[in-house]
Amino acid sequence: MTTPALQEKEEARLYDELRRTLEEVEEGKQRHKMLKHMIRQLKFAKWRKERSHWFNQYFQGARPATLWIMLATGALMPVVLFSIFIWVSLWVE
């Protein structure tokens, strides 16, 4: 997980890169293409920031028992699925 400070630095870096790119590239198709690419990067950075904020808020309120249950469920899921696969393959034959 990234911290909000790192996310803000990355977003500021992307805005600076967008500004520099707009200054460097001449008018026309190339500038439009670069602008679309940079806007896409900024939108993705914003989406990732919002998503990680939701994720951090969810796990700040989680109790240790909840986290252990999630870990145990994740660890046992492959065993359960493999057992179901074996059971179904034996039942089909």
Image (tube, rainbow, N blue to C red):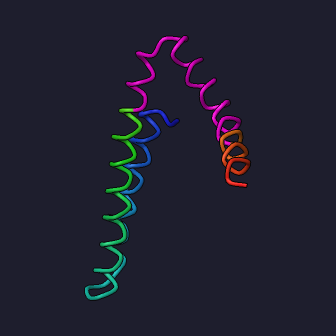
| Quarter of the view holding residue 30 | bottom left
Q: Position of residue 59 (x, y in %)?
A: 45, 22
Camera sees residue 64: yes
| Quarter of the view holding residue 9 | top left
* x 43%, y 34%: residue: 5
Q: How many marks?
A: 0
Q: Position of residue 19 (x, y in %)?
A: 32, 64
Q: Position of residue 79 (x, y in %)?
A: 71, 36
Is 35 in front, or is 21? 35
The reply, left or right, for residue 47 in relation to residue 27 is right
The reply, left or right, for residue 63 in relation to residue 22 is right
Camera sees residue 15: no
* x 36%, y 76%: residue: 34
Is 43 in front, or is 32? 43
Q: Which residues are magenta?
A: 55-81
* x 30%, y 72%: residue: 35
Residue 77 in the image: above or below residue 46:
above
* x 36%, y 71%: residue: 37
Q: Position of residue 38 (x, y in %)?
A: 35, 66
Majority secondary structure in the magenta region: helix
Taking the magenta stretch, the answer to whether it contains residue 73 is yes
Taking the magenta stretch, the answer to whether it contains residue 33 is no
Residue 51 in the image: above or below residue 32:
above
Residue 92 in the image: above or below residue 84:
below
Is 19 in front, or is 37? 37
Question: Is the C terminus in the top left, top right, bottom left or bottom right quadrant?
Answer: bottom right
